[in-house]
Amino acid sequence: MSQPPSQPPQGGFGVPQDQPPTGGADASPDPRSQGGFGAPQGAPQGAPQGTPQDPRSQGTPPNTPPPPHGTPPPPAQPPQAPAPQNIPPAGPPQPGYGYPQQPGPYAQPGPYGQPQQPGPYGGPGPYGYGQQPGYGYPPQAPYPGAPGIPQPGGPGGGSKNPFKGKPALVIAAAVAGLLVVGGTVWAVTGGGDDKKPVAEHSASGSPSASASASDDPANPGDGSGDGGEEDGDLNAGRKAGEAKVLWYKSAPDAPGSGADASGMWITGKTAVKSAYKQLFAFNVGDGKPTWPALTFPQKICSVTPQKTADDKVVIAYMSSAASSAKCNQLQQVDLNTGAKGWSGKVADGDLFDSTLSVELSVTGNTLTVGRSMSGTAYDVTSGKKLWDKKKYGSGCYPAGFAGGPKLLAVSSCGAGSSTEHDEVQELDPATGKVRWTKKFPKGWRVGRAYSVDPVVLYLTNDAKKTVNITVLTGNGDERSQLKSDDGLAPECGFAILDRDLTGCFGAVADADTLYLPTEAKSGPNEIVAFSLATGKEKWRVKSPTDATMMPMKTDGTGLIAYVEASYDGGGRVVSIPTGGTVHTPTKLLQNPQGTADIESGFYSKAVDYVDGRFYISTTRLTGNDEAKEKLMLAFGK
């Protein structure tokens, strides 16, 4: 995998040292534990700049400034985010915050903070994260000298950062109103904690359905051009053994500065895709609309990556088109029917805790709405408020939530004090009660959750130029730390702009094993299986082509992986046996060579393989009218 043009600082792998004791919810912070959040970064080209940033994000490497607002991504190869490294190249979702690190040998187990062959900042990182939706601390509003913001005199250089070394809360005060935070959801106009949210059906100003399928800008496609003559028949010249294009969709119009298109959900009959201000639903077999497209009053700003057991999701969209608009409008949607359920407004929290940005996740029947300094949970079925997660202990502020099989909260504690540190808690999704707390030593920042069940965390240490991948037990104790000499490369989004803690594509775990892709340097890359019990490599398998192979999911008996398209062939889906001693990939689907250019043209993508069909979609619209962008393709036999 190639690295982004301006990659963040890089260093070797290291293991967190002087580990503070694990305690319960009331455990007092260990004075030795100091640090903040960090996360792998690979800024998506064309990603908007100017998103408020979390005051805790200090020390962002100067070599990774986000692209100027409105700059469309270059047509070159997809950028890739930094890779974790406390595991020297072994063989770091694409999910804490960190910067690409130089490959350092993971092989030597050591205490937290012990760098292992650190590489120089700015060099290619072993993890090379790409453009998948990733997680990062709540974006911070750029200010002169802000970390990661280009300064006069060169990339990321120029004037000094006026806030360097200052406590997070001081920075928060300095950028008051610009911090990105989530808040309390009320069904109508919001209110204090003493008011109960009431679920209601959307009224005026809520999303509307297109009058007919013909009004949908992503028209039905059957593989013969999707209504456009410029593409011709995408199945023409298909060779024996190749899958066919079941359908594909062109992208809707987007602003010249680009737009997000992060959500993609597949049910038994419908493939649903978000893009800019709309939700599109396509029949999985023929691509015809299963329900009229929903158009929201303003752009979609956050979605629940997960869907509920009965195929519901929650969408957040902006309050207006103004630069001061909040990401505070919520709408529940049924993926199978397009029916709109309850709607609500996210209220601002306490001082500096606004709703310029929110983070959504689903765990069971609980919707968690996160902001940079707190979070609130709701019954995802009714919209009823369940509990709040606010400041606790000695200045601990919840900064991120990871949903899915379990619910994790990542907090920054004691900013600017001798007890400064990061910690992770597992919460009971129904009550918000803390089940366990894991504290990390000074300087270590929790950036991504490669898995929430089992818990696998990616941490960085900017001062030591190292990264670490730590596995926890079911009660929050340390189970193992990965040891590797490879550059590991799951694809994650740009941490400063993206708040999806679990958004790293290519990091997959089952009960006993973590699967990570290596960096592609010369020739095929590999997928490495690590034992969660020991952190050591169990086995590895090479990509069957010269293209990069990425883990997608496990199915109980094997690992499902996606082999990207190459110059001489389409991508493919393979199954890799996870048990036994033979791990040879078996081809499940071979995409046609005729669409290889389109398949590899997504500079930022989401993929899935469900019921024998492979889906690929963009997660970012460039807004370039000349590009004839594709929104989504479906392949099958």
Image: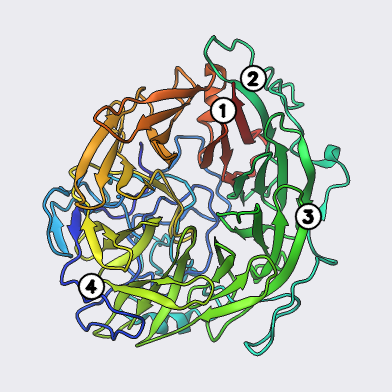
Q: Amino acid at mark 1?
A: Ile
The correct choice, above or below, for 585 with respect to 181 in the image is: above
Q: Indicate which disc, 4 or 3, sits on the residue closer to the N terminus.
A: 3
Q: Which residue is mark 1?
A: 598
Q: Are marks 1 and 2 in contact (CB under 8 Å)?
A: yes
Instruction: Identify whether 436 is placed above or below 551.
Output: below
Q: Which residue is mark 2?
A: 234
Amino acid under disc 2: Leu
> Viewed as shown, does residue 309 lie left or right of 497?
right
Residue flagged by tag 4: what amino acid is it?
Pro
Report how far apart the C-alphas of labels 3 and 1 lie in the structure.
Answer: 32 Å
Q: From the image, which quarter does the N terminus lie in?
A: top left
Q: What residue does disc 4 label? A: 441
Asked whether 158 or 379 is in front, the reply is 379
Closer-to-camera residue (587/104): 587
Three-letter amino acid code at disc 3? Ala
